[in-house]
Amino acid sequence: LKLKRPTPRLRFDQGDRYQKRHQHFDWYTKYGWLAGSITTNRLYCFTCLMFNGNGTDEWTNTGVSHLAKHFEKKAARHQSSRMHLRSQEALQMLGKSTTEKSTVESCRLAAAIHNREAETRRSTLRQIVHELCRLGKQGLAIETCTDSNMADGQDFSYLFWDEEGEPLRLDRIPIEQRRQLVQAIAAAMLGKMKEELAKAPFVSLQIDEAYETGSSRQVSVILRYCIGAKIIERFAGLYDLPEWGDLQLSVGSVVLKMIEEWELEGRLIGQSYDGSSMTPAGDCTIQAVVTDAGHHAPLVHSYMHRLDLILLFGTTTIREVRTLIGNLKILRNFFEAPKRRMRLINDGGILPPLDATQWLSTVHEYFSSISNILDAIVSNEHLWDPETLTLAIVLRQRLDDYEFVYLLCFFHAIFVNFIYPLVDFLDGNFSVYGSSTMEKIGKTIKDMRDLKKDVLVQSRVAMSLKLNPRLNFDEDMICHLKQLSEDIILDMTRQLKTRFKDHHNLTSLELLCELAFPNYAVEFPKLTFRRLVTYYQLFDQERLENELYNIYEDEQKRLPPVDLLDYLVRNDLEDVYSEVTKLLRLSLSLPAVRPQQKNIFSDECLLTRIKKAVASPNTSEYLAVLHVERDFLDLLSNDKSFKERVIDLFAVMGDRTELIYQS
């Protein structure tokens, strides 16, 4: 069509007696749009005639027949007109749009076919993800299960069907794909946690003692925050530490990484660490690393942390204590291994717990029974395998070691007389923020330091002889035990002082202790209030004071902090008591107080579940997230968007384009 422009020679000579005008045939070459009609004997615009034929312009309507002397100027004006430019564009695009539409349509059809196939594959994967979530909540080793290593009671057969309707077994899916699916579920869970965490005004961080996993050191991270009226504790995962290097700086770098990854800037209000190796005295502490980075987060003792365990393992800088703990572990492993040894223990009435301090107390309490069991094994050597017999002989020698028996008696006395009463006093209640707590901690430290070492050592030597009359203590041994006892007490009191050094800054939170509200209503605690607004410079002081006045005077609001926050949220009073609500959420986001909400799967604290998950040899760091956050996983497993997110992540991990929808 573009090549069929009519260009005839027309006959319409014009002029006067002085000059004749006629058509110049080279106009067709000069104006590529010019066309002529033999029928009308006129000139037209070819492009405008095709695409703007209904116009009133003479180039499309009547045609040009009058060859004035300014014809070329007239043609040039038309050539630059808006109508002509639009027509030119339409002519140039003629035929192209059809090709493009055809290409787009073919792409659309291909995408539709791909998406139908992707939906079929994703439908199968949704079943797999659902089952992995279900099994993950049960704590099963779903990453590595096979016919040969499947545990008793684990049925992985025919859990779902493929796209052809054929039944599948989970243990028939390649292990690498299972691992990637578990990793995708964990990543999607952490993504949901971040979305949840973004709503929290305050967050505290809990880092727990390094674990040995393969050749790498790891720490677990727990986040605690408050949303609405609910206290939430989440396991944020395991973080690798450098194999070598200063533990303080390594853990400090993990904390700073967490602050950046989880966007905690300006919201971190507390930090807690398990084990004295993470909270030593001096300037080079994890807290110092975090504080130097500009974060205002006091050190807080978490209700999850066993103070007796922390103090015991904190004294492992002393060689004799390391030896004691090593021997206790050997005893525990010896009696927990084969069922035959367990039967001996059960017959003797001993049911040993798992942790070190309870084993210490158990061995102290059942020393005579354990000694008799070991004697029975050694005396009846023909009934036992060589390994059991050898270990029994070695352990029998340990029970005759004066240092081992003395330290059993020494630690038992320290725990019973000083540490356990302090643990009971703290107890995870909100009263832990009271000024009486600091007095109790100070008194415990003072009483331990004021112990008369001679009297203490003599009493523990006497108890050692009562447990094992075969022991013999000479003068040199007594002098050694005095120095050893003094070193242990000094180390333990130092740990206590370091662990609670920031606690005095938190005593201002006793403003929320409901037992004191009647007294506060009579006389407002101005000094405590002043400490609070000085330490936490994020409140509208005048408004907070007035809100607290109203809270104290209203008997209906004399409730524990958790219940008071629930009352304010439930009755839409958050905006009315905005500053008190802020203070409540701040205090409840600190890990010193035990949450009232119970886990739907167990009453274990989060840290206990983490330790059990990590202790399992078949649990990866990703599977640990599923095992620990079973309640959260149960909530998410019914969320369609969560499953779609898992599949999207799984597709990206293996570059599986067949699972990704096309638009």
Image: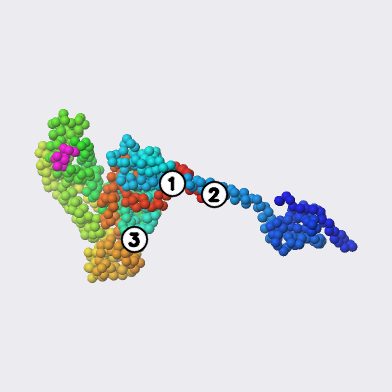
Which is nearer the N-term, disc 2 or disc 1?
2
Q: Nearer the viewer, mark 1 or mark 3?
A: 1
Q: Which mark is residue 3?
A: none
Where is residue 408 shown, x and y percent of the image? 17, 43
Dividing the picture into quarters, in which one does residue 327 lie?
top left
Residue to which mark 1 is pinned: 122
Residue ID at (77%, 60%): 63
Q: In the rendering, at what x and y percent does residue 631 appear?
A: 32, 51
* Residue 343: quarter of image: top left
Name the foreground residue: 425 vs 575.
Answer: 575
Q: Residues within 10 Å of mark 2 (few under 14, many from 20)?
A: some
Please rate how many residues cluster around mark 3, counting C-alpha atoms within 10 Å: few if below 14, some from 14 to 19, many from 20. Answer: some
Residue type beneath disc 1: Arg
Q: Write down the region rendered in magenta.
A: 342-350
Instruction: Name which residue type carries label 3.
Output: Gly
Decide which of tag 2 and tag 3 comes sooner along the chain: 2
Instruction: Point out the frontmost of discs 2 and 3.
Output: 2
Does residue 293 appear in this view?
no
Label disc, if present, on residue 108 of the rendered structure: 2
Which residue is disc 3 drawn over? 228
Of 396 and 525, which appears nearest the observer? 396
Outermost residue toward the top in this view: 382
The disc labelled 2 sits on which kind of residue? Answer: Arg
